[in-house]
Amino acid sequence: MRKYFIAGNWKMNPLSDPLPLLRELKVKLVGMNNIDLVVAPPFTALHQASELLRETPIIISAQHLFWEEKGAFTGEISASMLKVAGADYVIIGHSERRQYFSETDHSVNLRLKTALNNGLTPILCLGETEDERERGITFEVIERQFKGALSGCGESDLPGFIIAYEPVWAIGTGKTAQPADAQEVHEFLRRLLRDHYSSALADTTRIIYGGSVKPDNAAGLFKQVDIDGALVGGASLSAESFAQIAKASMELV
Ligand code: PEP
């Protein structure tokens, strides 16, 4: 059985002091050892988070990285810098990066390979926009993003990597996908893993859902056979609601 993977993406929040939220998470997530718990704070809080959560099972993720190792790339951050700051995972291809920072399937691919080559585990985000769903091209878009992101990656590169299906229309909008609709896309992604790689990789890779996951809709999503957890945005900024989402998965283990 795949272990549930519950990750909190803080995005560019909180604006000032991350310590109260980190301290509260440490208390509220204690004992949740049957699942994988991840927090992705902004760059400036990575080091504090990794220090504070050192003795806990909570893993640290970055939200972004650049593919060059060093040099004149003002404002960017390399994989080795993230590792020094304490990150083990990195979110790649989030729709906000695609939408506001011109990420393409090609740049997602470069970032993903950089993460893999530097011992950072990618959380690869993909998902269709509302317009694409309405036009009936969801699967086409997902397949294009999947192939683009993983181009040139062999099966031996990928154990442990995470796929996050995040329909763009559900992110930060309060509109969650119906569990059965999300399941359909997760099943499709698992089929892509099987067809392009192997049954072994398809059976072991965690495919998590993101898009307005809250304590009251989490269990319905987690009960779906191909949904292995969540990437949580807004609700991860409250330790209480993040812990309730994590608990919803614990109760199914
Ligand atoms: C996200 O940022 O990945 C996300 C899913 O956000 P929210 O939970 O706020 O929709």
Image (cartoon, rainbow, N blue to C red):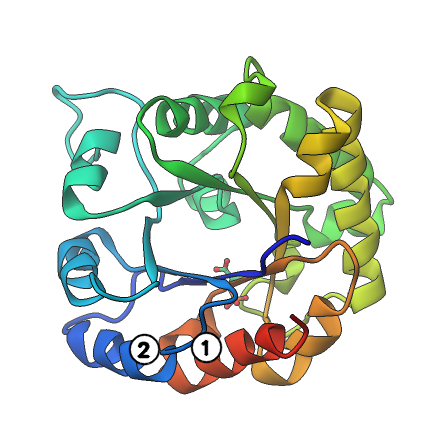
Q: What's the residue at 81%, 46% (across, down)?
A: 187
Disc 2 within 8 angstroms of ligand 1 (CB): no
Quadrant position of the C terminus in the picture? bottom right
Quadrant position of the N terminus in the picture? bottom right
| Image: 66 above or below 72 | below
- Outermost residue on the top side: it is 152
For label 2, the residue is 25
Q: Position of residue 175 (x, y in %)?
A: 67, 72
Relative side of 87 to 194, left or right: left
| Image: 186 above or below 230 | above
For label 1, the residue is 242
Relative side of 252 to 37, left or right: right
Which of 43 and 190 lies nearest the eye of the viewer? 190
Q: Position of residue 168 (x, y in %)?
A: 62, 54
Q: Residue 243's quadrant in the figure? A: bottom left
Q: Position of residue 126 (x, y in %)?
A: 61, 43
Q: Earlier in the sequence, mark 2 or mark 1?
A: 2
The amino acid type, in three-letter code, at marker 1 is: Phe
Q: Position of residue 4 (x, y in %)?
A: 58, 61
Q: Residue 100's quadrant in the figure? A: top left
> Of the numbered discs in the image, which one, if any, rests on residue 253?
none
Q: What's the residue at 52%, 38% (across, down)?
A: 161
| Image: 68 above or below 137 | above
Instruction: Give neighbour class at mark 1: few <14, some 14-19, many 20+ (Cα, 10 Å).
Output: many
Q: Could you tell me which secondary element the residue under label 1 belongs to?
A: helix
Distance from disc 2 to disc 1, alpha carbons, whole Å, reads: 8 Å
Q: What's the residue at 57%, 78% (across, down)?
A: 214
| Image: 233 above or below 201 | below
Asked whether the beta carbons under mark 2 and mark 1 sit within 8 Å of each other, the answer is yes
Q: What's the residue at 68%, 74% (across, down)?
A: 252
